[in-house]
Amino acid sequence: MDSPDSSRSSAKGGLGDAVIDALIGSVDCFHARLNLLQFEAKEAGTDLVVRLICFLVAAIFCGLAYLITLVGGIAWVSISQEWTWYKVTLIVAGIHLLLAVILVAIGKRRFGRKPFRDSVDEFKRDREWLEEMRREK
């Protein structure tokens, strides 16, 4: 017994068959794009978690460095250099702010790739193909 696909493909030229074939092709293309999008979403989720962990660890290290410097360094520098404690505190805060900016810049550069690159590229190719098909008509 013939399958529905083989009997439809043997009957040539019907408008209904062409519409059904176009609909099946569109659904197949949509399904493939959906699978690609789902795969890239998993990758993007993993990258996002890694990125958030890196920024959180960087913030914790900056906070710890600030506290340690605050406790031991401010008193030592203010006594040894005969500076007021608030000037030393401002200098230490500025140094640690600079370190935090550097860590954020490293994090952005390390994980700066855009998510869903493959899907976006596929959509661009699809648009170009559709434009070519419209020009041919």
Image (spheres, grey):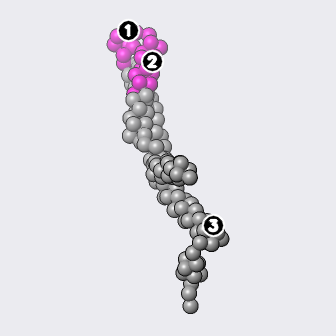
Instruction: State if disc 1 and disc 2 touch (CB < 8 Å).
Output: no
Q: Position of residue 70 (x, y in %)?
A: 43, 24
Look at mark 3 in the image and give the residue it sits on: 19
Q: Position of residue 31 (x, y in %)?
A: 55, 63
Quick one: label 2 or label 1, which is nearer the N terminus?
A: 1
Foreground pick, 49 / 27: 27
Q: Is residue 96 magenta?
A: yes
Q: Is residue 92 magenta?
A: yes
Look at mark 2 in the image and give the residue it sits on: 89
Residue 123 seen by the camera: no
On-image quarter of the N terminus: bottom right
User: Mark 2 or mark 1, which is nearer to you?
Assistant: 2
Q: Secondary structure at mark 1?
A: loop
Look at mark 1 in the image and give the residue it sits on: 82
Q: Secondary structure at mark 2?
A: helix
Q: Which residues are magenta?
A: 76-99
Count numbered badges in the picture.
Answer: 3
Name the amino acid, label 2. Thr
User: Few, some or many C-alpha atoms within 10 Å of disc 3 (few <14, some 14-19, many ≥20)?
Assistant: few
